[in-house]
Image: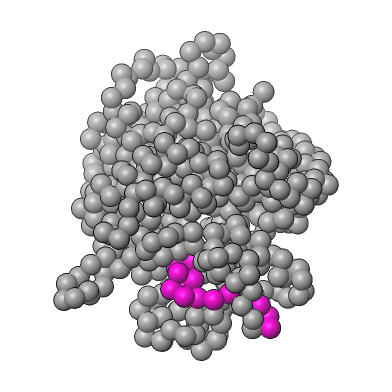
Amino acid sequence: MVADHRFDYVVLGSGIAGLTFALNVAEKGSVAVITKKNRAESNTNYAQGGIACVTSTEDTFDLHVRDTLEAGAGLCREDVVRGIVEEGPERIKELIDLGMSFSERENGGHQELDLGKEGGHSKRRILHAKDITGREIEGALLTALALHPNIEMFENHAAIDLITRRKLGFTTDNRCLGVYVLDVKSGKVETFASQHVLLATGGCGKVYLYTTNPSIATGDGVAMAYRAGVPVANMEFIQFHPTCLFHPKARSFLISEAVRGEGGILRNSEGKPFMDGVHPLASLAPRDIVARAIDAELKRTGAECVYLDITHKSREFLENRFPAIYSKCLECGIDMALEPIPVVPAAHYQCGGVVTSPEGRTELPGLWAMGEVACTGLHGANRLASNSLLEALVVAHRAAEAVKKEKAPKKQKDIPPWQSGSAQDADELVVIYHNWREIRQLMWDYVGIVRTTKRLQRAASRLRSLGVEVQEYYWNYKMTCDLIELRNLVLVAELIVDSALSRHESRGLHFTLDYPETDTSSPPGDTLLKPE
């Protein structure tokens, strides 16, 4: 059976990692970029802070490496950290050459990069475009991509599962051969054949009730890779951003860490700063520490939120430095020049993921992964702010260079079409929506910032039952995007809980009351989950 589509490279996801890879390999062959929504809808597009990179004479690679290792709480791979940090400036230059413009400021009569500072960083090293960095990067990449004749974009297409030789019944030389994809508008499942498939699907923030992530962040890449037999690691390390706007009109709006980098102070409901006695960096402490401190403060006081106060800065400064945040707050009736911003922690970033080499190669030949979906060893147990876009740029470039040098494997002639069998149209959509809400509430209540073994065990038990229900629904009804996402969400939730249960210590983003100390009796190790 001839596939519906055949490309040299298939990219799942349209964020900074996927688009960078696509642009780099397009000179060698045809590229399909597949995205669930419109081409600009990605976690990259919502990134406010910027890209961490050494560009100042006051900064050094050693300092950036040290800050990353300290934030990662002993689980970063130092060789990976150093490689990505040192390669950063060259990749930033390429991004600028594509048309990306970073904010500048005047210094002594000349213009220089306006470098921001965020939690855990010892120097100003965050390149940004005011507070809409991700949107500007996405725009520059999409403009370049639209001009390339070898790249075809498939919007409103949702990947269902990877196609492998083993799944087709071959017992030797397993390899990724492509992917089954739902055309959301037509309802047809199409076959995309390719010898190189790239997962750049982002994270899994929507597995939690409160998140800064867009609705597309349902852990699709992790789930698909795991079902295809690829190991995942360190899924217990979910980073909760300390400051998500607390307002009914903007439940997923992030208040960038750069606000604290410019002097913003966290205050409790009584107006008192509470971070001074928690960490030497006070409100600029690493994210895991700040998120736990806010969680403790909310539980201690019974308040619904805490407050981020930057009223000591002028209105002119705030409007210029944080135009998107300033505008959103005003829209919600909050004048951040005159009053503190109400904030709460929310699920933000997945530090673990599909296990890859430093150039994005997975254990399954033909399958690559990069960006938030991947676990390269850079982030360890806690991501240093703004290192994610840097990692995506560097690894995407490395993967493109590696894949272009590979000898083209023999193409698989026969890939069977998707089989719907006797599946019916879903007549009880309420089941999908109920299970979706239950998973997210359960994860928020039982697998949040502070955990216990008993709560994790309860979550594991209920998720196993939900997994069975969802799988039965999956086989009995025709494919929809909601069903695809629900199936992925429940699997990723199980992986997070299983990983958390297996780590008998508190480290980085994983904090459990049953094992409140970090285990120093042996070298720290990754939590590795391998499919049976």
- Magenta span covers which residues? 256-270
Residue 151 shown left or right of residue 301 in the figure: left
Q: Is residue 363 above or below residue 246?
A: above
Residue 422: which quarter of the image? top right
Can residue 456 be seen in this snapshot?
Answer: yes
Residue 376 shown left or right of residue 495 in the figure: left
Q: Is residue 372 above or below residue 139?
A: above
Toward the bottom, the furthest residue is: 338
Residue 458 shown left or right of residue 475 in the figure: right
Q: In which quadrant is the C terminus drawn?
A: top right
Q: Position of residue 228 (x, y in %)?
A: 57, 27
Its colouring scheme is: one colour
Residue drawn at (22%, 75%), measured in percent from left and top?
106
Toward the top, the furthest residue is: 172
Residue nearest the observer in this picture, 529 or 504: 504
Residue 139: which quarter of the image? bottom left
Q: Position of residue 436 (x, y in %)?
A: 69, 51
Residue drawn at (45%, 79%), measured in percent from left and top?
326
Can residue 158 be seen in this snapshot?
Answer: no
The stretch drawn in magenta includes residue 258: yes
Residue drawn at (47%, 28%), measured in percent from left and top?
362
Count of numbered tags: 0
Residue nearest the observer in this picture, 461 or 271: 271
Q: Position of residue 242 (x, y in %)?
A: 59, 64
Residue drawn at (36%, 39%), measured in percent from left and top?
83
Q: Position of residue 424 (x, y in %)?
A: 68, 38
